[in-house]
Image (cartoon, coloured by chain):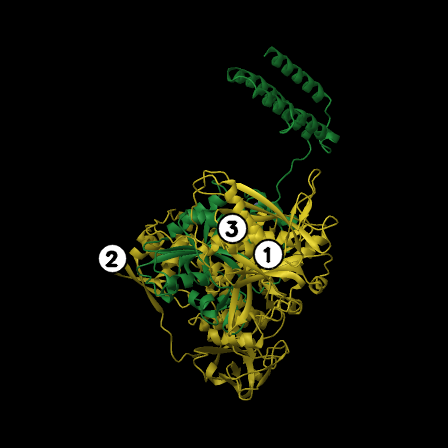
Chain colours: A yellow, B green
Amino acid sequence: MKISLDWLKDFVDIDLSLSVLINRLDMIGMMVEEWEEKDSDIILDIETYANRPDTLGHLGIAREIAAALGLKMKKQEWPLVELEQKTSELCDVQIRDADLCPRYTGIVVKGVKVGPSPDWLRKRIEAMGLKPINNVVDVSNYVLFSTSHPIHAFDLAKLAGRKVIIRRAKAGEVIRTLEEEDVILTSDMLVIADEERPVAIAGVIGGLKSSVQGTTQDVFIESAYFNPVSVRKTSKKTGISTDASYRFEREADISFPPQAALMAASILTQFGGKVSKGIMDVYPKPKKEKTVILRYQRVFGLLGLEIDEKFTEKTLSHLGFRLEAQRKGVWQVKVPHFRVDVEREADLIEEIARFYGYDKIPVHFPPLRVPEPPLDEKREKIEKTRQLLFNHGFDEVLNFSFADPEREASFQTGREAVEIRNPISQKASILRTTLLGGLLDNLVWNRNRGAEGIHLFEIGNIYFWQKKKTHEQLTLAVVATGPIGPAHWQRKTKEADFFHLKGALESLMSYLRYEPFSFKKTNHIFFEEDSSLALAQKGETIGHFGLLKKGLRDRYSIDGPVWAAELNLEVLFKKKPQSFQYVPVTRFPTVTRDVSFIAGQDVTFQDIKEAVEKLSLPYLASFDIYDLFSGSSIPKGKTSLSLRFEYSHPERTLKAQEVDKLQKKVIDTLKKSFNFLLREGGKIDK
Amino acid sequence: MKDLKARIEKLKRDFDKALSGVKDEKSLQEVRNIYLSRKRGAVKLLFEELKALKPEKRAQAGQLVNSLKKHVVAKVSRLKVKLAASKPGVRARKGDLTLPGVRGYWGAPHPVVLFQQKIENIFIAMGFSIEEGPEIETDYYNFEALNFPPHHPARDDWDTLYISDDLLLRTHTSPVQIRAMERRKPPIRIIVPGKVYRRETPDPTHLPMFYQVEGLAVDKGITFADLKGTLEHFLKTLFYEKLKIRFRPSFFPFTEPSAEVDIECLVCKGKNEQCRVCGGSGWKEILGSGMVDPQVLKNVNIDPEQYSGFAFGMGIERTAMFAYQIPDMRYFFENDLRFNRQFSIK
Ligand SMILES: [Zn+2]
């Protein structure tokens, strides 16, 4: 809200330097966002709040300053040059819907010479950033910015039958507004009408036909209170927002319409106007002032500070509240109509604190009486996941939850996307159903800026409809391409590949104690055929990973292989991790046995692993594959694989014969099950 | 015996001579084998000889043979280390120890998460726990329960993305406070981090999605002074001990009284009227806060006559931007690794 310092001085004598005034305003919550010098005046831009329509005019801001500085408000006089005729003889006002218009006042000013405004008025209008139009229009704006109460001026001659009827519009009625726009009205909208047609959309905008023009002689001034919700709905529905509707929808001061009308009439007499006798005031059910009980002990209870009772009384009276002591420490407070925001004791306590100064409230720490619950396990698991992926060289990214429906479609996730009804753009009009879209965007962004090795992960929700409800599913996705880490003069840099990604996922599952887990060969829509696996835990699929499909890479114009994964963390994290148990470390040495086989290429490691596990050999501490190759020294179509077995006993040293026996069992089983040939010292044992 | 001693001395001299000619690991292995081979090495053969000696002489002779073995083992292993250190690559720049070492490589956290955890940790130390809730919310939890009446213009300050008449993308994490208060009895002391959404076109200071941390404390006798104490401690820990802080009245539908918290401009400390960061005011708005509105407590069946509380909220990106002088909020979601990775050392 623009506030002119000169204008403020009409209401209160301010004798402060600008910086002191600005600081004072800031500290009572009237934040000065900017200020500028204009025509030897200072224009402040003050931040106002939706609950304080009274501060949308100079009068309201002046009241705040007066209370803050302990000054008296100046009295303003609005003398009238009156006609013999009564207002009621010149026009007829009827309220047909008192819910939407509880109060309507009007007065007629005859013989106004419509023309340019005098300098003082032009200056004020320009200070508000508006262009002066003519003296009558400028006066209505002047009253609005002065008092925050909107008024409207009609050309009396254009009101058919000299009637002012406040009624709901008939469905389909049309009005051409001051902005020369035709608006089709609906029956929930309130209008001002004459005998024949609507002449204004109540509280929002006037009609063109009844507006004041150069030829106008007699003016009807409307000053009313319209239902805030009704004005807001109408303004939203018609898409018309004006200085008037902005104030009415925040609620006007119901006690103020006559004063605003008289103020306007008084100024119009400066332009030759004469005012009808007796203001027309239709106010069928006068509203009572609100009453709030204020307890001194609650002031202390909420602020944590003793505030002098005298200060409380003085401040609230200054702001227009009327206090009546009921008993010691308890007041009954009458709230002036212009303070639409004050309804409860807490609202009054805020007023006291505001003027006492938030800076004078002491600093204290709230005692902790009952401990809070510990952090939940999900957060801990997310944190472990992040740390593990960092260690594997993956960078964390965060992307917007929005997605472009067209791009998203290429992933064919089969998830029903959640659409946004009023998106900021078509490209952000649904919520993402996969995290991969964002990650691929990030990959392209970084590659276009020269990055070669790009290894990213994101943990966040994807969104979709499930059984007619929106579902938010915590998800982890990974993409990887190129070298891992910078090149080094001594060490060779590793490149991202399938096993780099698989290893990260295996470590993750172990680190989260989700063992045993398994991999299944399946094809998935994101990945090239026979180039992906499903990760499963206790038979339930957690996600898929592998070589991203060329079609998807093409969609993002990415050259070269991209390895990707998407896991459903919601399902995974609901599973119970293996309970941790301490296992005593044996004090006796571990015996290692290596064995190499020539194997057919159709046997998978998973097959071998399962076969070994099935044997449940005693003392077998670990089992792994440590070498794998095929080539000229190996028969065509075969592979050489080397396995390492480690045995240990908790209570004694294992004897060589014992281990030999166990090892023989493994070798025999593998030879028999998979037709393996034993390979020793380069020779193949048939 | 003398004979044995002399033979061993000679073996040592021969060994030393042979070793002086060794230039690589292969010839080292050969020389070693002459003396230490398990089957035909000189040491092995000498031990075999000892078997023929009488027991009283055997011990002494054994010591002599062992001294040869030790001599050979020590010199071989010393030379082995030396040879390893002069392998190709290193040999090319022999002695240049200023070459870069082998650094570990690890991924970096996203700066928003990093900053969020920094904030969380300060509150956890003050006895707060962490709550989370859905991002897609109902109008009731996002607005009505927080004392925004339907059709109230206050809603205009929270420009909203809607899914349907009743479903929306939460505009703040405050609905989680309502859900927590519905579920738990006071005392409650929580912070609520998370994504929030506004209908804003991206520009340097606005995004349609950003991260917030909100907090709530409800108990008997919670006062505005407690709010000030908690937030002052938080801000001084996050920035620095001597930070200047001011609380100034404001308006939020869900708090009464409400306060905006400003901190001194970290760039000019209020000493530059042309400062682009604070606009010359010397202050920067950092938190919204206030005492929980009695109507909000009533909405979750907490008696405002018995209990009171405070609530606060802040934007994570905005705060990080101010702390590190980042000029554009959009950087956080471009995920340019040259930007993101900088913060991992913070
Ligand atoms: Zn500054």
In the image, residue A61 sits, relative to residue A192, either above or below, namely above
Q: Mark 2 points at which residue?
A: A328
- Indicate which label's residue lies in the foreground, 2 or 1: 1
Q: Where is residue A515 in the image (x, y as percent from the top left)?
A: 50, 55
Give the mark nearest the N terminus, 2 or 3: 2
In the depicted view, which residue is nearer to us: B158 or A182?
A: B158
**Counting other residues with Cα less than 10 Å from the Cα at mark 2, is it few (<14), some (14-19), or many (20 or more)?**
few
Q: Are the residues under marks 3 and 1 on the same chain?
A: yes
Q: Quick one: SS at disc 1?
A: helix
Horizontal relation, residue A87 to residue A113: left or right: left
- Indicate which label's residue lies in the foreground, 2 or 3: 3
Q: How far apart are marks 3 and 1 (CA)?
A: 35 Å
Q: Mark 1 points at which residue?
A: A672
C-beta proximity under 8 Å, tags 3 and 1: no
Q: Where is residue A590 in the image (x, y as percent from the top left)?
A: 51, 40
**Counting other residues with Cα less than 10 Å from the Cα at mark 1, is it few (<14), some (14-19), or many (20 or more)?**
few
What amino acid is at disc 3?
Tyr
Q: Mark 3 points at which residue?
A: A511
Q: Residue furthest top?
A: B2
The answer to whether any part of residue B6 appears in the image is yes
What amino acid is at disc 2?
Lys
In the depicted view, which residue is nearer to us: A651 or A391?
A: A651
